């Protein structure tokens, strides 16, 4: 009973498959070509104007012979449509999307200062000015400042409130006595050890106001190597101090060159290194 059922189902499947072939394909009777070659009868796909489902279209497999058609698809289509009359379909796309752009607005929190500048909320003052209660105040006479929160007095002056007062010396020549000489020594006026008061040095028999880090050449001072005349023209300072006086606290000096600190740039208006 089982064998009979299987046979009936197989027959039904075959008949169904055959019916579908008969409906989809066309049988071509055998014929002779002009050269005498006989072409056997065969099935082909039904003519429907669609070259892509032909068994001879490159890449399609004939279910009756099991063979896959060779060749180039573009060449096949060109021949199918009669040569140059065939062209690939073109497509166009139209977008209805219209982008919108809104110009952003910006607010600046940049603050300005007289005789100084801000970095964030911190006030920095220009050279020879100092920060006093949130304002840049000029250094007093006989004093100088590096833009910080205080000022400094020149040599021989001391800070008194917001000014630099001259230090009055209590030095008295009468506290020194002339040296004594033995009989083997010759007493000469130019051998007497004349002393200079503090802040002065003896050069060529004269007491000259002493400048640190400098040499006196008989008529003027010359700064020692690696020292430079400061902006006041009265002191010899190191290269780092010289640069900070010239370019502001955002700078530094190495050997004989000045540079802006990392993150700072030289401002073309103030000629200072600012952040």
Image (spheres, rainbow, N blue to C red):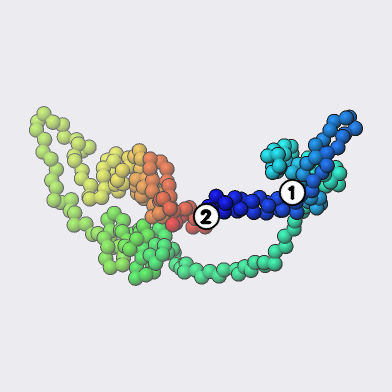
Residue linked to disc 2: 268
Residue at 37% across, 70% down: 134
Residue most toward the front?
A: 1
Residue at 11% across, 35% down: 181
Checking the image for residue 109, the label placed there is none
Residue at 30% across, 58% down: 153
x, y percentage for residue 217?
A: 35, 38
Q: Residues within 10 Å of mark 2 (few under 14, many from 20)?
A: few
Relative to 117, 9 lies left or right: right
Q: Secondary structure at mark 1?
A: helix
Visible in this render: residue 220?
A: no
Pick the front one: 97 or 50 = 50
Residue linked to disc 1: 53
Residue at 40% across, 41% down: 256
Q: Are marks 1 and 2 in contact (CB under 8 Å)?
A: no
- Kindly report the distance in space between the C-alpha atoms of the residues bearing marks 1 and 2: 78 Å
Name the quadrant containing residue 83. Answer: top right
Residue most toward the left?
A: 182
């Amino acid at each position: 009973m089982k064998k009979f059922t299987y046979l009936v189902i197989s027959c039904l499947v075959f008949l169904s498959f055959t019916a579908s072939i008969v409906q989809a394909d066309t049988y071509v009777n055998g014929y002779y070509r002009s050269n005498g070659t006989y072409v056997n009868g065969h099935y082909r796909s039904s003519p429907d104007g669609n070259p892509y489902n032909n068994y001879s279209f490159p890449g399609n497999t004939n279910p009756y012979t099991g063979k896959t058609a060779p060749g180039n698809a573009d060449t096949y289509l060109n021949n199918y449509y009669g040569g140059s009359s065939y062209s690939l379909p073109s497509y166009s796309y139209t977008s209805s999307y219209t982008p919108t752009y809104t110009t952003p607005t910006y607010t600046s929190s940049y603050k300005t200062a007289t005789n100084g500048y801000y970095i964030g909320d911190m006030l920095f003052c220009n050279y020879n000015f100092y920060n006093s209660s949130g304002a840049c105040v000029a250094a007093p006479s006989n004093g100088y400042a590096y833009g910080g929160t205080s000022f400094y007095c020149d040599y021989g002056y001391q800070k008194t409130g917001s000014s630099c007062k001259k230090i009055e010396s209590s030095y008295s020549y009468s506290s020194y006595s002339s040296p004594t000489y033995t009989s083997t020594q010759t007493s000469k006026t130019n051998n007497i050890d004349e002393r200079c008061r503090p802040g002065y040095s003896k050069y060529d028999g004269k007491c000259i106001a002493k400048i640190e880090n400098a040499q006196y050449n008989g008529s003027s001072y010359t700064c020692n190597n690696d020292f430079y005349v400061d902006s006041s023209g009265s002191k010899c300072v190191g290269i780092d101090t010289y640069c900070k006086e010239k370019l502001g606290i955002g700078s530094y000096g190495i050997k004989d060159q000045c540079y802006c600190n990392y993150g700072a740039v030289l401002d073309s208006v103030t000629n200072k290194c600012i952040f």
